[in-house]
């Protein structure tokens, strides 16, 4: 017998636990002492096929929600394939990645949030789908996808990936929040919070809709051979004495890339051996690149101290090739990118926002307050000068990442939600 809605409403899932998490290979890999085998669920017959939901998302650019879809797609290589609908075209590194994992990806071109035909177009797309449950991610997908799914008689799960899902207080931002609130409160069947802080920030928005905390996870990373690490660093112009800082994510107001660049320039002036790899794209990229030229005017064009690498699908190989991970966000949920950096064995400098203080012990990272440019610069310079400190922080961050490597447990939790609704 499936769990009742009341039971799911009360359930708050702690981070999934994995046995025997140990450090290995330069602190680069999440490793389990023994393979995990899924515990039998008494509520779902063992022979029953997994219940999959149709995943609907704003876009397939570089982001935490997109990484989670790739993680979920990687779980279905045994005859089932994840179905994904993206509402936007444009640069989409995760489209290729999802398809390589066997997922079937549909992109709806030129779908506009305010166009009167957008919901009818999405209704036509969803009507022919066999999945009884639609799982939507991010704000545009919520506003368009939730009503479209309900119009064709499907049940709806909404994941909230951020403490603050809509930025700013403009008229447009207030309208977006109001529309999203309506969908969460009146049309969704279940809301998934990706972390405890995300739940606290958004609980009042969902009304009587049942909500559940399902913490983000990452698959266990593969070790990067030392020769490959050296090759990546050489190819990106990193010298033997250089300390490589990497930042990943969208170049948006949330991530505060302007603070990152200014703080890096100040740290580089002190340490002298720092380089920065900015991995990601977004609306602020041109402005951030212009700032980099201003704060580092004497850059060597052959070996620049800041490299903008754009949206990449090989982040998991770039991370262990670096030494420090930098996250300068103004707000967050439970960032998947930070989990990946922890599991890659990097020293971490980050802001104290969202679920980060609950995710990272105080002795596992150098954390500063949001918008503290001087503090961020001092932390970068401190880590650049102290290899032993970097390695100590990395070791403890790696241990803290262990519970979030239980992808099988996370998958089972989602499937129980889908099964109860279906």
Image (spheres, grey):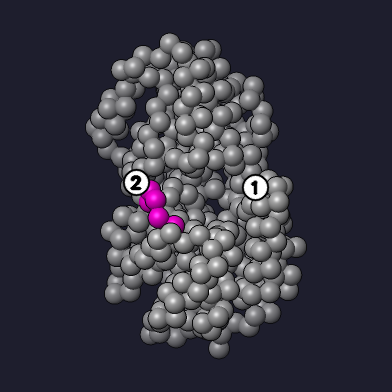
Q: Is residue 272 above or below residue 65?
A: above
Instruction: Report which residue position mark 2 lands on.
Output: 313
Say above or below: 74 vs 330. below
Determine if residue 280 is in view: yes
**Which region is colored magenta?**
88-92
Cα–Cα span, label 1 and label 2: 26 Å
Nearer the observer, 56 or 346 = 56
Q: Earlier in the sequence, mark 1 or mark 2?
A: 1
Place of residue 249 in the rendered image (x, y in percent of width and height, measured from the top left)? 48, 42
Judge the density around disc 2: few (<14), some (14-19), many (≥20) Cα neighbours within 10 Å: some
Using the rendered image of the protein, determine whether residue 157 is visible from the camera's viewpoint: no
- Which of the 4 image quadrants contains residue 86? bottom left
Residue with the mark numbered 1: 167
Q: What percent of the width, then of the height, locates residue 72? A: 42, 63
Disc 2 is placed on an element classified as loop
- Is residue 79 one of those drawn in magenta? no
Relative to residue 13, is residue 47 depicted above or below? Answer: below
Packing grade of label 1 (10 A; few <14, some 14-19, many >=20) is some
276 in relation to 164, above or below: above
């Amino acid at each position: 017998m499936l769990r009742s809605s009341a039971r799911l409403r009360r359930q708050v899932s702690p981070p999934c636990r994995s046995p025997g998490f140990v450090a290995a290979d330069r602190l680069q890999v999440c490793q389990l002492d023994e393979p995990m085998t899924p515990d039998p669920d008494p509520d779902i017959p063992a022979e029953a096929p997994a219940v999959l939901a149709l995943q609907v998302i704003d876009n397939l650019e570089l982001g935490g929600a997109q990484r989670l879809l790739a993680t979920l797609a990687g779980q279905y290589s045994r005859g089932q394939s994840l179905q994904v609908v993206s509402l936007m075209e444009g640069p989409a590194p995760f489209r290729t990645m999802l398809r390589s994992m066997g997922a079937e990806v549909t992109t709806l071109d030129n779908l506009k949030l305010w166009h009167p035909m957008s919901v009818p177009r999405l209704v036509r797309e969803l009507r022919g789908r066999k999945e009884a449950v639609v799982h939507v991610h991010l704000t545009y997908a919520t506003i368009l996808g939730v009503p479209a799914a309900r119009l064709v008689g499907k049940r709806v799960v909404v994941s909230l990936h951020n403490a603050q899902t809509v930025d700013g207080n403009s008229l447009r931002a207030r309208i977006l929040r109001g529309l999203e609130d309506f969908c969460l409160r009146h049309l969704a069947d279940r809301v998934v919070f990706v972390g405890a802080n995300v739940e606290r920030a958004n609980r009042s928005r969902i009304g009587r809709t049942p909500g559940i905390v399902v913490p983000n996870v990452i698959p266990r990373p593969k070790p990067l051979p030392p020769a490959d690490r050296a090759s990546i660093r050489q190819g990106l112009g990193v010298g033997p004495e250089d300390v490589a800082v990497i930042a990943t994510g969208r170049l948006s107001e949330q991530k505060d890339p302007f603070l990152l660049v200014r703080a890096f320039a100040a740290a580089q002036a002190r340490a002298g051996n720092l380089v920065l790899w900015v991995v990601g794209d977004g609306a602020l990229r041109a402005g951030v690149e212009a700032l980099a030229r201003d704060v580092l005017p004497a850059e060597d064009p052959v070996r620049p101290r800041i490299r903008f690498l754009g949206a990449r699908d090989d982040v998991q190989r770039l991370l262990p090739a670096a030494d420090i991970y930098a996250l300068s966000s103004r707000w967050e949920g439970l960032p998947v990118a930070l989990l990946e950096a922890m599991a890659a064995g990097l020293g971490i400098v980050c802001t104290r926002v969202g679920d980060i203080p609950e995710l990272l012990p105080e002795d596992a990272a150098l954390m500063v307050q949001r918008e503290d440019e001087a503090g961020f610069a001092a932390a970068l310079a401190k880590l650049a000068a102290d290899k032993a400190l970097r390695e100590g922080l990395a070791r403890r961050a790696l241990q803290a990442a262990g519970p979030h490597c239980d992808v099988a447990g996370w998958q089972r939790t989602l499937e129980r939600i889908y099964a109860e609704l279906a």
